Structures are given as C-alpha cells and as structure tokens.
Image (cartoon, grey):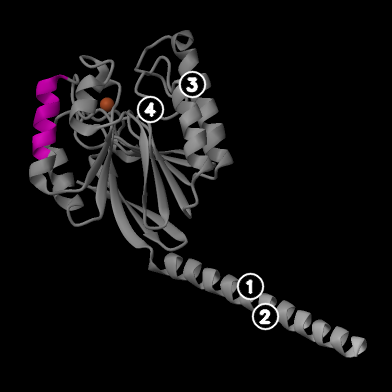
Amino acid sequence: MKKKMMKLISVFLLALLLAAILCSCQVREESRTQELEVRDESNFTFAVCGDPHGNYQIFGKIVEAAKQLQFLVVVGDLTKSGSEMEYRKLHDFLEGSGVSYYLIRGDNDREKDPQGINFIKYFGPLYRSFNYQNSHFLLLDNSDGFNGFSDEELRWIEDDLGENSSRHIFAFAHIPPGAPPGLGVPYNMWEKARISGERALEILQRFQVELMFCGHIHGYEEYQAESPRILVTGGAGATLHLPEQIGGYYHYLKAHVKGEVVEVEVVRI
Ligand SMILES: [Fe+2]
C-alpha cells in the first residue's frame, strides 16, 4: 500500500515538472515572438538638421519636408543670440508649421541666455530622452564650448542609458566632442570641454550608442566613423564653413530605421 502511494506521488510530481517545463517554454516562445513582432514593426524616418541661426528661408524648407516624416531634431544654434524675441519667433513658427520637433541648444543660443531660461520657457528641459518605436533618443546639452557636459549631465546620461532596453540608441549634441568652441580659440581654454567630451564618448560607447548627430560646424561631414559614428549636420541656414566639395552645402539628414537596420541619407536643399 505504502509503495503504491509512493508511486502515485512520484507520477504526480513528474507530471507537475513536465507541466512547468512546457509552460516556461511557451512563455519563452511568446516573449520571443513579441520581440520579433516589435522589431518587424519598427519602420520610421526622422529628420535631423543643425544651425539654422534664424535663417527661415533655408530652415523653412527643411521644416516643410520634415512634416512628411515622423519628427525633426534640430541640433542647436537655433537662434543668433538666444534672445526671448528670437525664441518666441521660432516657437510660433514651429507650432504653426505642424511639424513634430525636438530641439537642443547650441553655443550661439547661450549669448543672451547662458542659463537656458528662454530655452526652457519655450522648449522644455536642456537635456532629456524619449523612446520612439524600437529606438531611444538622447537629447544632450554641451553648448558651453569651454566646459562641455556638466558632471551632473554625465551622471544622468549613464543612469538614463542604464535603464534603456531599446534596440537602437541615437544621441544628439551641438558641439562634436573634441571640437573647439569657435575658430581661433586658444587650445588651453577648452581643456575641460575636451575632457568632458571624452567622458561622454566613453559612456556612449559602453552603452553601444550607434549614432551621434552634432552641429556647430556649418556643413555636412562624417566626424567619426564608429563607436559611436558621429555625423555633423550644420547646414540648416548659417553661413557655411566648409568648401562645397567637402560638405559645405545646405542640407538636412533623413535617418531611416527599419527594424535592425539604420540608414542615413543626406538631402541637399
Ligand atoms: Fe552655429
């Protein structure tokens, strides 16, 4: 009798184990399917441009084109001096256009607004992030060309990326890390910015940020090939810095995200 009881208990336990294994396989399969579905569904295009400097003739064409896309990111030097009047004009223009947009500020925008009070009033926090489909977007502020990223911002970047689970990560900052605040500024005056730029790049590399978009240099160029790849797009209206043959033309970028694949297209104006 005791033997029979033991046998029954063994059979019951075995059945229980089998059910648990089957159930966990199903959950794994379901989550894998969900993952694949999310990857497959991700298909969108966003635009990036930089340095309009209040030139609405060129910038207006970019905004018009970006209305057909998911959203536009402008990587700083939105205005000539950051005055409230310039910010109000920009805000009214963008709101009236119907485009979805995200902005960061550049060194020019600091001239009359070093603390970013006007920027915050019209466009929100100086740095932040958001998710769209399978991608994470990091909007950064290194507009102080002499000091670069603050320690507080670097800590925030690390925390923010630590929580990210999106497939792609894109970063945006006005000044390409390692670039000077302006032409002719002595090398020893922006050492802090260089060091903070190196620290930022180390974090972006560690969290496998694929692409970083910057402005500041007025034209288009691939500034760094990888880890992360850095593209400069400063051709949205400011006086061009580069000869035409090497990127000195008005333009914006279209970034196409199709599941795992990201392709960037340069569109000349
Ligand atoms: Fe600029």
Q: Which mark is residue 175?
A: 4
Q: Which residue carries the number 3 mark?
A: 151
Viewed as shown, does residue 66 lie left or right of 137? left
User: How far apart, in angstroms, are the residues tagged by discs 2 and 4?
Assistant: 57 Å
Number of the front mark, 1 or 4: 1
Mark 3 Cα within 10 Å, few/some/many (few <14, many 20+)?
few
- Where is residue 69 shown, x and y percent of the image? 23, 56
User: How far apart, in angstroms, are the residues tagged by discs 3 and 4?
Assistant: 17 Å
Q: Is mark 3 within 8 Å of ligand 1?
A: no
Q: Is mark 1 within 8 Å of ligand 1?
A: no
- Quadrant in which ligand 1 is drawn: top left
The amino acid beneath tag 2 is Ala
- Of 245 and 217, nearer the camera is 217
Depicted 195 relative to depicted 98: above or below: above
The amino acid beneath tag 1 is Ser
Local SS, label 3 = helix
Quadrant position of residue 11 = bottom right
Q: Which mark is residue 90?
A: none
User: How far apart, in angstroms, are the residues tagged by discs 1 and 3?
Assistant: 44 Å
The amino acid beneath tag 3 is Asp
- Where is residue 236 shown, x and y percent of the image? 22, 37
Q: Which residue carries the number 2 mark?
A: 19
Number of the front mark, 2 or 3: 2
Among numbered discs 1 and 4, the one appearing first in the sequence: 1
Where are the magenta residues, as a range? 83-93
Residue at the spot x=47%, y=34% of the render? 157
